[in-house]
Amino acid sequence: MVVGEIVHHSDLLVIGGGPGGYVAALHAAGLGLDVTLVERHRLGGVCLQHGCIPSKAWISAAADYHRAQGLAELGLPLERGEPDIRRLRDFTRQTVERLTNGVATLLKARHVHVVQGTARLIGPTSAEVEGPEGRQIHHFRHAILATGSRALEPEGLKADQKQVILPRGFFELEALPDHLVIVGAGYIGVELGMAAARLGGRVTMIEALPRALSGLSPSLVEPVLRRMKQLGIELRLGARIESVQRGAGGVGLSLAVEGGKAEVSGDVVLLAVGRRPNVEEIGLEAVGLPAEGFIAVDEQLRTALPSILAVGDVTGPPLLAHRAEAQGRVAAEVAAGRPAAFAPQAMPAVVYSDPEIAVAGLSFEQAEALGHKVARGRFPLRALGRALAGRAGDGFAEVYADEASGVLLGGAIVGEHASDLVSELVLALEMGATLEDIADTVHPHPTFSEAWGEAALAGLGQPLHTVRQEGSPWV
């Protein structure tokens, strides 16, 4: 030990204060462990500071602004003004600050020792931390790595946070660009692109793959593509960037497309092409763990070293905040010596597009590929009184079940409030529910949630508020 070094001992050291890390720290402290959490930036991680929360503030504001323009047809005309992006940015910052303070308050209440700095493993039960208080040595029985992920930057298109920005830069804009070019049509690109378009901006999206939101079934994406077209979003699919020209007038992109080449220019280019794990400079090589790629873990979220666990984005896809939180709770249980494993029956995923898309469990295609004869029930939202009354009839709910047993395998919902409605599907999957269980559950009327009961009835061949398809039996 070097003279002047500060030495700490704790039961659990958590490296990273994002959703996985701070939840692990809170739960472990609640189980009676002495916990230290190290965060090099601010509590809450990318999700709270630069991702989930800021994006939803902008998406919600954009939806309200765009929706207000249609109130005139209901006899409720509103004077339309131009959006003040700086005020929206300030609101977003205030929201983030409030939530960040809330996390800090919770950690303090649980007596978690929070240290600002950068942690590096130096052994299977020790780490060094460099921060404002100097160099510290931390000894622990267990450590949880929760260092998250960061945005990818393609070669030749590095972000300068002025003309070429990463998603976090979108929320720091002084004004909405006249023409925003988004590279990547995954969920981040689609969410932010649609928000910008609803605020009145011109948007072009460039995607190397042949489909937008390629990880989802095409039928789920169709309503979103229709809406993108209505909003005037230009979608360039199967396009690869060959060169970039930056100048005083904006950014020009030369593209390779099917049949030749194309040019796209815009005021600001937003990069939304994926994420990579933060595994560098945390000392993985010092303890014999691979220092590249995602960190491999077992069901107990242990790495190859029993004393080192990992949670969240750093463990690989799906890169979701709620997955990180769920893993954080399990890792805390394991560190406390309790029997626990991360083995959810369903992991929900949501795209906050217009309309929203939410899925859980197996897709129809996945269920068939696994050999199931699938009973599929779909119910259109346009048949719901609540949806029509709220001018939100675009979309549908679907359920997929094993035809022989009726056991639910998965499902999806496209439409307004899909992000909230999917929780019923997740619970049903976790409980091993059947189509009859869902159909026999009384849903309040008039609500969007009725779509689940109606979809289940359709899957049973007993549609109620839709016309029975020819050949579908009455059971």
Image: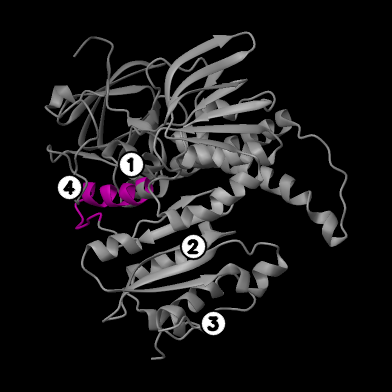
> Which mark is drawn over residue 467?
3
* Left or right relative to 112: residue 282: left
Identify the mark nearer the N-term, 1 or 3. Answer: 1
* Left or right relative to 101: residue 130: left
Please report the residue visible at 33 percent of the width from the left and 73 percent of the height from the top.
401
Please report the residue visible at 31 percent of the width from the left and 80 percent of the height from the top.
406
Q: Residue 58 location, x and y as percent?
A: 63, 39
> Which mark is drawn over residue 413?
2
Q: Secondary structure at mark 2?
A: strand
Circle 4/circle 3 CB separation < 8 Å: no
Label 4 belongs to which residue?
A: 298
Q: State which mark lies toward you, 2 or 4.
A: 2
Identify the mark nearer the N-term, 2 or 1. Answer: 1
Q: Badge 4 local density, few (<14 within 10 Å), some, or many (20+)?
A: few
Q: Badge 3 local density, few (<14 within 10 Å), some, or many (20+)?
A: few
Q: Which quadrant holds residue 436?
A: bottom left
Distance in Å between CA atoms under marks 4 and 3: 48 Å
Please report the residue visible at 65 percent of the width from the left and 40 percent of the height from the top.
232
Q: Badge 2 local density, few (<14 within 10 Å), some, or many (20+)?
A: many
Q: Main secondary structure of the magenta part?
A: helix
Q: Secondary structure at mark 4?
A: loop
Q: State which mark lies toward you, 1 or 3.
A: 3
